[in-house]
Amino acid sequence: MLGLLAKEGWQKANIGEYHTQKQALSRFSIAALILSEPVIDVVRRELRRISKGIRVEETELQKVLREEVLKREAIEGEKADAARRLVSRSAGRSITKSKAPEVPEVAIAAPPVSGVPPKEPTPIS
């Protein structure tokens, strides 16, 4: 923690990175992620798998998570709304970085084994 306040920490902007990490790991961000559609879908699938095929509705699962699993303070209020907006904005972004443009492969002729260059093909007349 003291390293963040040291001269080297200020020069490398470590305090900004620390703040971003703390925001990402806040109870509000985690609650918003848990209540997001992709996570709800995964939880439904796993519940169906462990309960031998019993289907759980998305709204029913969200209700249980909101009322019985998560604390009310983590899903209501200004900070929870800000975290929900952050999650919904990032939902459209891809998780993986974009690929570099494809570079066409170039065939390189192998050097002759015997030290004698290969003969040129003779045209057919």
Image (cartoon, grey):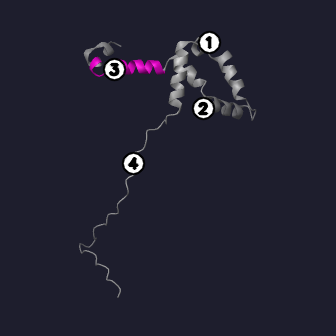
First in sequence, mark 3 or 4: give its number: 3
Residue 91 is marked as none
Residue 101 is marked as 4
Q: Is residue 1 left or right of residue 74?
A: left
Q: Separation of disc 1 and disc 4 at Cα?
A: 47 Å
Against 106, residue 72 (above or below) is: above
Q: Position of residue 11 (x, y in %)?
A: 27, 20
Front tag of 1 and 4: 4
First in sequence, mark 1 or 4: give its number: 1
First in sequence, mark 2 or 4: give its number: 2
Q: Position of residue 122 (x, y in %)?
A: 31, 83
First in sequence, mark 1 or 2: give its number: 2
Q: Going 69% across and 28% down the picture, which residue do you hit?
A: 58
Task: Kindly indicate whether the residue at mark 2 contacts the one at mark 3 (C-beta within 8 angstroms).
Answer: no
Amino acid identity at mark 4:
Pro
| Secondary structure found at label 1 | helix
